[in-house]
Amino acid sequence: MENIENVAGRIGGIKKRLRCLSDEIWNHPELAYKEYFAVGEAKKFLTEQGFRVENPCCGIETAFRAEYGTGKPAFAIFAEFDALPDVGHACGHNLICAAALGAFCAAADELKEKNLPGKIVLLGSPAEESGGGKVKMIQQGCLENIDAAMMVHPSFRATPDTGSCAITRFDVIFHGKSSHAAAAPELGINALAAVNLLFAGINAYREQIPENCRIHGIITDGGEAPNITPARAACRFFLRSTSEEWNQKIEQRFHDIVRGAELMTGARAEMIPFNIPYQSRKPNVFLNKAYLENLTSLGVEYVIPARGGRGSSDFGNVSQKVPGIHPYFPIADHEIAAHSEEFRVCSGTDFAFDNAMKAAAAMAATALKYLTEPDFKARVDADFKGC
Ligand SMILES: [Zn+2]
Ligand SMILES: [Zn+2]
């Protein structure tokens, strides 16, 4: 428990400055790949703390990287800082950024002062909500020479990482033929009918999918006027499962149902992938255990949820590549939904920030344990490899 006390003390020393950063980012919500203000704030802070910041990074203007230490092993801490349309920081990524920066500085200072082996790396990853910043950064090699990775995320309670769904997303546009819907309906091909049949097909399919799958869609274009047979209609669907195998199965069935809607109506379907697919998260048992032990020692109580997470994150791709976890810390004392106005408000409170700093300390101590305890590293690595 020595690590946790030391890093908690170090974070205490920079807490005020991190609170300003978190509040500034919360007050300036920015969407995917446009997070210039947030990255500017992070760079300013890291430079003040004596670190050199690489930005742009991985060919992305709003990605950044900093590191301390040499050689192996190397542990990466991911920061996020993007917001959502309309609801701003309703996923609390301002807190994720402050926690990542705090954890990185505390771990780096410990390595420096005690002349410990290993390297701590901070990866600033844009566009988690849409755009798959981490997926693009991985494609550009951000995990080369990295042995394990971690980030923390706000929630209404503290929990370990219980996994997440792989996700694929599609826009489906049906092309039909317009006609006067009353005077000459026989000359039209109704594209909206194809959209409706796609929804009907998906709803019938729901009975045959396991609980760890999610399929949800919206109609994005339903035609122009009731007296015009819609020549164009469109919808957007998200397909998810915690099982990569099931995600592929539901995607295949989705293609078949789209094809069925074409056959039933005569409309032609155009399927366009929307956003980058994310892989499911593969939580590491021993990193989870260490994080929860560290968090508990700071007085935060955790719960183990009855079932795994059903959301999706581009950290999924990270955890499939190297051992990793994406656990949670509390920002409210009652259940609140992510991506809601209430979550946005809670992401700016003292309670949320205090817990973000405790999560940061728990993350830094977990990283140090991995870097400095070969037995622990061996257990983490073996769990990742499925041994
Ligand atoms: Zn979110
Ligand atoms: Zn989020």
Image (cartoon, grey):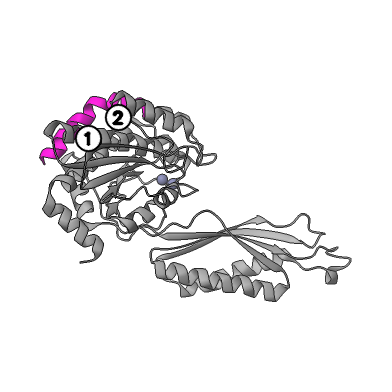
Position of residue 221 in the picture relative to residue 114 (left or right): right
Can you tell me whether the CB of the residue at mark 1 lies under 8 Å from the nearest atom of ligand 2? no
**Is residue 274 shown above or below 340?**
below
Can you tell me whether the CB of the residue at mark 2 lies under 8 Å from the nearest atom of ligand 2? no
Q: What kind of residue is marked 2? A: Phe
Q: What kind of residue is marked 1? A: Ala
Position of residue 235 in the picture relative to residue 299 (left or right): right
Image quadrant in which you'd find residue 106: top left
Residue 108's disc is 1
Residue 21 spot, x, y in % from top left: 37, 28
Q: Are marks 1 and 2 in contact (CB under 8 Å)?
A: yes
Is 230 colored magenta in this rendering? no
**Is residue 158 shown above or below 104?**
below
What residue does disc 2 label? 51
Quarter of the picture holding the N terminus: top left
**Is residue 75 shown above or below 28?**
below
